Image (cartoon, grey):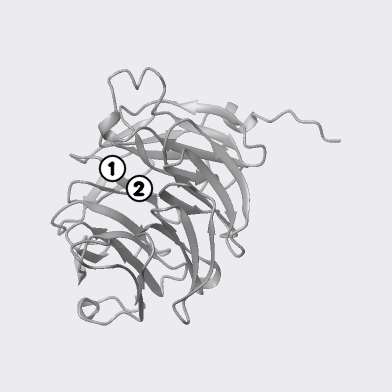
Amino acid sequence: MKPLMLQGHERAITQIKYNREGDLLFSAAKDSKPNVWWSLNGERLGTFNGHGGVVWCLDVDWQSINLVTGGGDSSTRLWDLETGKNIATIKTNSSVRTCNFSFSANQAAYTTDKAMGHPCEVFIVDTRTIDDSLSTQDPILKWEITDSKVTSFVWGCSDETIITGHEAGDLIQWDLRTGKKVHSVKEHTHQINDMQLSRDGTMFITASKDQTAKLFDTNSLELLKEYKTERPVNSAALSPILDHVVLGGGQDAMEVTTTSTRQGKFDARFFHLVFEEEFGRVKGHFGPINSLAFHPDGKSFASGGEDGYVRVQSFDQSYFDYTFDYNRD
């Protein structure tokens, strides 16, 4: 199956995400315009114009009504998805590294970098009514991160907690009623680049610069599985229908050489969720993969690379027929 190549960005992709139904695919990049595409045919639906620099993160709510983005221009922006209009702009002291709607989309959270004398902070805002007043409204909750900065995060179960991943490799669970730390674990030795929840939200996978991806329990932060590679992992996603994990990464942009593509350094790599064994690779990008996402129906996946392309790859029947041989005794 030939992949769809989505070419709409001038610079490296930073994050991609499907909406809940999977008919739309969103992409953010180091240029200033997040894009939205039809995932079926790769046609571009539109861009969200307004950021003044790199857009590090984006998220869409479950009803596909609003989009939240965070960027290097020290702002978090909320957009009307239908019109592409910038509804609210929340100014911050430093660049916004991560942003996510909660499952209910009643709240959104975002984190800022430690920079220019300002600490890394986590903000929770009320997004039940999204209008211009959000630009000036105080957050419901905010707290400072005194340890290493937040590089990724996910919402915990029933929107009561968030779990942050840090530059030093820590995972910290926070209670949103108090803004206090509940639990922390340090299973990674380097920065956590990406965190994605499983379909039912009971588990999440982390991708780290320490060349591993790890599966954790969302409530207890117990380490369940580990997937090892030979290069930094920038993104990891869990299949919604099969026991499969996809990892993507590559060396830092500084260390990339021309031979890397031939050596398979930029492949999307498939591992079995339970057995931690690699069983397949998909080639395609000319640089490290920065973000990965499974389509909500599990029949295709998308990857965004340092090369500025988003590739949507549908799986052949052989992928679904493939089974692991193991001794059932």
Residue 186 drawn at (x, y percent)? 52, 55
Query: Which of the 4 image quadrants contains residue 242?
Result: top right
Q: Residues within 10 Å of mark 2 (few under 14, many from 20)?
A: many
Query: Which of the 4 image quadrants contains residue 43?
Result: top left
- SS for dot 2: strand
Does residue 32 appear to the left or right of 26 in the view shown? left
Q: Is residue 160 above or below residue 62?
A: below
Q: Quadrant of the C terminus?
A: top right
- Identify residue type, mark 1: Ile
Q: Residue drawn 57% across and 61% down?
A: 218
Residue 255 visible (yes or no):
yes
- Find out whether the residues at labels 2 and 1 contact each other: C-beta distance under 8 Å: yes
**How far is mark 2 from mark 1, CA to CA?**
8 Å
Q: Is residue 220 above or below residue 269?
A: below
Q: Which residue is tagged 1? A: 13
Q: Which residue is tagged 2? A: 16
- Identify residue type, mark 2: Ile
Residue 264 drawn at (x, y percent)? 42, 22
Q: Is residue 7 above or below residue 206?
A: above
Does residue 202 appear to the left or right of 137 in the view shown? right
Q: Quadrant of the N terminus?
A: top left
Q: Residues within 10 Å of mark 1 (few under 14, many from 20)?
A: many
Residue 142 drawn at (x, y percent)? 35, 77
Depth check, front residue: 149 or 270: 149
- SS for dot 1: strand
Q: Is residue 245 above or below residue 284?
A: below
